[in-house]
């Protein structure tokens, strides 16, 4: 699915580590574009778990500044024996919109 006018900020995912063997075939260093509409080829179970955080980053939300970088989050998949670790990053480039509001 491709939107003519993107909503919110771009969110990228990068696989930072894997304990054991990822059954979905993800490898350390894999990068993908993620959004509330795009899975980027990420494992469905992993995407399901991190979906609320993807939407939060995309739509401009965040955690308190005391918790660290508001634009970067890290998660592990639910497979405790073969856990893949992903870094989600909000990309604050110009031209992205949230419900018609332009961010420069």
Image (cartoon, rainbow, N blue to C red):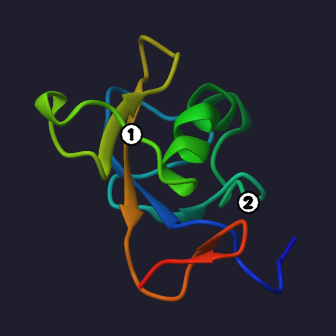
Task: List x then y, in percent, for residue 34.
Answer: 60, 59
Q: Residues within 10 Å of mark 1 (few under 14, many from 20)?
A: some
Marks 2 and 1, Cα distance to the nearest angstrom? 20 Å
Task: List x then y, in percent, for residue 18.
Answer: 34, 35
Question: Nearer the N terminus, badge 2 or badge 1?
Answer: 2
Q: Is residue 49 visible?
A: yes
Task: List x then y, in percent, for residue 72.
Answer: 29, 48
Q: What residue occupies the far right of the structure in this picture? A: 1
Residue 41 shown left or right of residue 59 in the figure:
right
Q: Is residue 9 above or below residue 93?
A: above
Which residue is painted at 47% across and 78% down in the image?
A: 103
Q: Quadrant of residue 20?
A: top left
User: Of helix, strand and loop, which one carries label 1?
Assistant: loop
Residue at the disc numbered 1:
62
Residue at the disc numbered 2:
38
Q: Is residue 7 above or below residue 85?
A: below
User: Of helix, strand and loop, which one carries label 2?
Assistant: loop
- The quarter of the rendered structure image containing the C terminus is bottom left
């Amino acid at each position: 699915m491709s939107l003519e006018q993107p909503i919110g900020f771009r969110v990228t995912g990068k696989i930072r580590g894997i304990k054991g063997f990822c059954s979905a075939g993800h490898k350390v260093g894999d990068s993908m574009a993620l959004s509330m509409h795009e899975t980027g080829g990420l494992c469905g179970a992993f995407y399901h778990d991190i979906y609320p955080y993807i939407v939060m980053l995309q739509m401009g939300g965040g955690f308190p500044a005391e918790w660290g970088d508001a634009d970067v989050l890290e998660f592990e998949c639910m497979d405790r024996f073969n856990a893949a670790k992903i870094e989600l990053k909000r990309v604050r480039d110009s031209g992205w919109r949230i419900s018609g509001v332009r961010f420069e």
